[in-house]
Amino acid sequence: MFSKYRDRDLVKKAAERIAEAADGDPLRIMHVCGTHEWAITHNGLRDLLPENVQVVAGPGCPVCVTPGGEIDALCSLALERGVAVTTFGDVLRVPGRKGSLAEAKASGADIRVVYGISDAIRMARQETARDFVHFAIGFETTAPTTAVEVIKGPPSNFSIFASHKLIPPAMEYLLQSGASIDGFICPGHVSTIIGSDAYKDLAARYAKPMAVAGFEPLDIMLAILNIALQRKRGIAEVYNEYARAVRGPGNTVALRAMEKAFKVTDADWRGIGTIPGSGLGLREEYAKYDAAGKYGIAAVGWDRMPEGCSCGEVLLGTLRPEQCPLFGRDCTPERPVGPCMVSIEGTCAIAFKYSDHRLRSLRP
Amino acid sequence: MCLAVPGRVTKIEGEKAEVDIGGIRREASLELVSDQGVKIGDYVLIHTGYAITKLDEAEAIEILKAWRDVARAELEG
Ligand code: SF4
């Protein structure tokens, strides 16, 4: 349907126009989406860009920023309390302090991978004698799916460990911390929910051009071109390149559900720290579905990266994965050291998949 | 995790739809797009089993046309 967005000539043309628009001045653009990182690397778009234009990955992978302490809490819940923990596939191998959920599963814990929260609820309905806790991670794309199910009222043996995170507060945090970013490619799928208007205030307050982009090569190139052109003209707006999926106000049904089910909280981002107003907790009305309260799980906090891992810098876009001393040798997707190598959307895993460093791991 | 894939709606039953994702049929919930007037034949983006938005093909073609014109103007200009 959208194969035209892979048109070679148009992509090349866009690259030429980016070079013109950026005018030789350094232009550092950050995206905050694992799928964008995948699309950029998979299509080799960085090679098409002029030397002065850099696109770096920010904290766009929800699995990578899930605190190790939360992994620990869910492992103990499954191992010590016999609760069945459901979650998304990528989460299983994320290292906690005492191992990963995959390791807990190997030692007999009931850990199940689900495609979506509705599968988890179906299991809970079928196995009424067992308690289920769904480890609900994900950004604004995933949070509304949790919200609609909570509002509908899952069975009483089902609860949620809410670890959803919000993207605009993380963007603001990076801008506030003085990270060198000249503009943002806004995440396409998150934006289908929150809308392109959600970034307007940030773009204006920090004077940073932004463009919401889809995931085809041309989508991303056009977003970069737009950011370059905005800078050239001295403006900082939000351009919606992905209008086939994203509307200004977003998905109002989804936003209403989120508003109803959740309240905004502070949240810990692994490798980054606590970002104010960047998390979602269940509202009082839905407290009976809140696993943290139900099982008395104390706030967990621990978010340090494993020894020697540079994920924190990778997540902030200050280090490319290849620059981490462990990359490709000690840390590979088969034997990940840090969370950025675990998730298929992690910057390190993507870099590894598409780099010749694969060979390095074969060295004696 | 934030992955979403486009699928074509082949059947609708209340809030559930059957979608065709590159030849594979799957069930998807339409709860989050209940106000978007999704019909059989429409494309939707699906994330963890929920349609999160309807895809607007007309809009896509418009944008592409605009950019083709930009590219052409470049070539001719
Ligand atoms: S290569 Fe491995 S150890 Fe290094 S930053 Fe990435 S995940 Fe962490």
Image (cartoon, coloured by chain):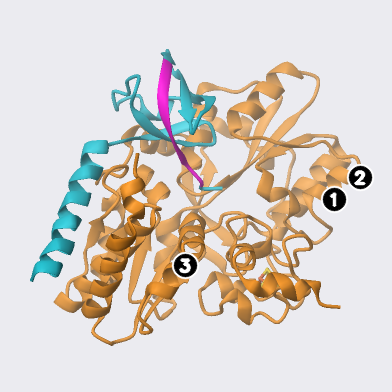
- Residue at image mark 1: A103
Q: Chain of mark 1?
A: A
CA neighbours of label 2 inside 10 A, class few (<14), some (14 to 19), many (20+): few
Task: Please determine whether, in this image, residue A107 is positioned above or below residue A70.
Answer: above
- Residue at image mark 2: A107
Q: Who's the residue at 44% across and 77% down the image?
A: A177
- The tag earlier along the polypeptide, 1 or 3, is 3
| Residue A355 in the image, given as x and y percentages of width and height | 61, 70
Label annotation for residue A44 = 3
CA neighbours of label 1 inside 10 A, class few (<14), some (14 to 19), many (20+): some
Task: Please determine whether, in this image, residue A23 is positioned above or below residue B24.
Answer: below
Q: In the picture provided, is A156 more to the left or to the right than A44?
A: right
Q: Decide: marks 2, 3 in contact (CB < 8 A)?
A: no
CA neighbours of label 3 inside 10 A, class few (<14), some (14 to 19), many (20+): few
Q: Which residues are magenta?
A: B3-11
Outermost residue on the right side: it is A107
Q: Where does the C terminus of chain A fall, quadrant-wise?
A: bottom right
Q: In the picture provided, is A251 more to the left or to the right than A130?
A: left
Q: Colour of chain A?
A: orange
> Looking at this view, is B35 or A294 the one in front?
B35
Residue B8 among those drawn in magenta: yes
Task: Give, as a three-letter code, the residue at label 1.
Answer: Glu
C-alpha separation, residue under disc 2 versus residue under disc 3: 41 Å
C-alpha separation, residue under disc 1 versus residue under disc 3: 35 Å
Q: Who's the residue at 40% across and 81% down the image?
A: A180
Label annotation for residue A136 = none
